[in-house]
Image (spheres, helix red, strand yellow):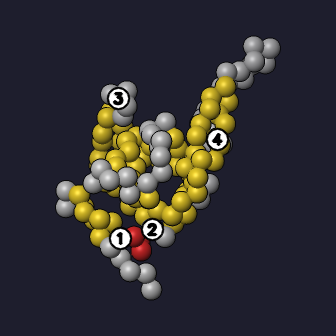
Amino acid sequence: MAVCAPIKKNNRSVCVGAMNKKIEIEARAITPPTFSINTDYNEDFTLVKTVWANIVTVSGMTTFDGTNVERVVTHFFYFRYIPNITFENWIKFRDEYYDIIRVEDLDNDNKFYLAKASKRGTINNQANLA
C-alpha cells in the first residue's frame, strides 16, 4: 500500500498515493490552411510526457490566463514537476483534451505542479450547425 506524504500550500494538500490517473502532457502546434483548399487551421498535438496525476473537478471558479482573459476552470491536475510546462501545453486524459490555464509550482521547490485547466473535449468536436 502506498505511503501518502501530504504536500501543503495555503491549506491545500495532495497525497502522492492519490496520483492514480495517467495523463499525457502535450504540446500543440497550429498550422494555417493551404490557400488552395478551403479548410480551417490544423492542430497537431505531440506528446511531451506521460505522468501520473490526481484529478480534481471544480465548479464555479474563474481565473485569468496568460493573456489576461477571464477563463472558467473545470479541473485541477496535480502531478510531479516537469521542466518547461506552461499554459501553452495541453493535458490529454481518456481521449479528452484540457486547456491548461495556469500552472503553479507547489511550495516553489520544483517537486509538484498544480495545473488549472478547462475541459475542451475531443479534438474532433464539430460545430453544431442546427
- Nearer the observer, 71 or 77: 77
- 99 left or right of 65? right
Residue 50 point in image, percent of width and height:
58, 57
Let me know if residue 44 appears in the view: yes
Mark 4–mark 3 Cα distance, whole angstroms, equals: 23 Å
- Tell me which amino acid carries mark 1: Cys
Foreground tag (1 vs 4): 1
Residue 103 point in image, percent of width and height:
38, 45
Local packing at callout 2 (Cα closer than 10 Å; few below 14, some 14-19, many 20+) is some
Local packing at callout 3 (Cα closer than 10 Å; few below 14, some 14-19, many 20+) is few
Helix, strand or loop status at disc 1: strand
Helix, strand or loop status at disc 3: loop
Question: To which residue does mark 2 refer?
Answer: 19
Question: To which residue does mark 3 refer?
Answer: 69
Question: To which residue does mark 1 refer?
Answer: 15
Nearer-N-terminus badge (2/3): 2
Q: Residue at x 34, y 49 (%)?
A: 105
Mark 1–mark 4 Cα distance, whole angstroms, equals: 30 Å
Question: To which residue does mark 4 refer?
Answer: 45
As drawn, 18 above or below 75? below
